[in-house]
Amino acid sequence: MERTRQIVVALDFDNRRAADEVVDLLGEACRSDKVGMELLTAAGPDLVSHLVAKGKEVFLDLKLFESPNSVAGAVRAAGALGVSMVTVHSTGGTGIMSAAVGSGRPATPHAFARRP
């Protein structure tokens, strides 16, 4: 695995301008970014689509904890945006975890998965 794929930069900002500045500053030196709930709420899904269009791997760190149906829908929506990873709160139990895995399967295989 390329070293630049092993580093995920946390875009822990409350506005898109600050996130864009860091992404632009790092350029190709960083290929993976984390977007959390605060930035997603402030900047919207367009930011995620923009990062994916720039060739970035996006880790959507939302710690989903909702009904299995809602978690499945959120994971599908994240996959449609092109994200590579989504966090799901495991204390929600196997129903939530199964729903997340099941709805994530049709998406592109996990970009960070280790390959032999």
Image (cartoon, rainbow, N blue to C red):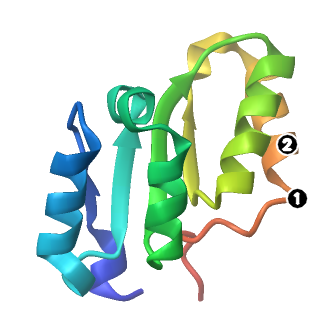
* Placement of the C terminus among the 4 image quadrants: bottom right
In the image, 46 versus 55, the foreground residue is 46
Name the residue rendered at 54%, 43% in the picture: 45
Which disc number belongs to residue 103? 2
Tell me the SS state at disc 2.
Answer: helix
Which disc number belongs to residue 19? none
52 up-or-down from 60: above or below: below
Where residue 12 appears, as percent x and y from the top left, is 22, 38
12 up-or-down from 47: above or below: above
41 up-or-down from 19: above or below: above
Q: How many marks?
A: 2
Name the residue rendered at 22%, 80% in the picture: 27
Mark 1 Cα-neighbour bin, 10 Å: few <14, some 14–19, many ≥20 = few
Dot 2 amino acid type = Ser
Tell me the SS state at disc 1.
Answer: loop
Where residue 106 appears, as percent x and y from the top left, is 88, 58
* Placement of the N terminus among the 4 image quadrants: bottom left
Q: Are marks 1 and 2 in contact (CB under 8 Å)?
A: yes
Q: Give the spatial CA distance, label 1 vs label 2.
A: 7 Å
In the image, 37 versus 87, the foreground residue is 37
Q: Specify the quadrant of the image occupied by residue 37.
A: top left
In the image, 52 versus 6, the foreground residue is 52
Dot 1 amino acid type = Pro
In the image, 33 versus 46, the foreground residue is 46
Q: Specify the quadrant of the image occupied by residue 72.
A: top right
**Residue wearing tag 1:** 106
Name the residue rendered at 23%, 30% in the picture: 14
Mark 2 Cα-neighbour bin, 10 Å: few <14, some 14–19, many ≥20 = some
Q: In the picture provided, is 99 more to the left or to the right than 28?
A: right
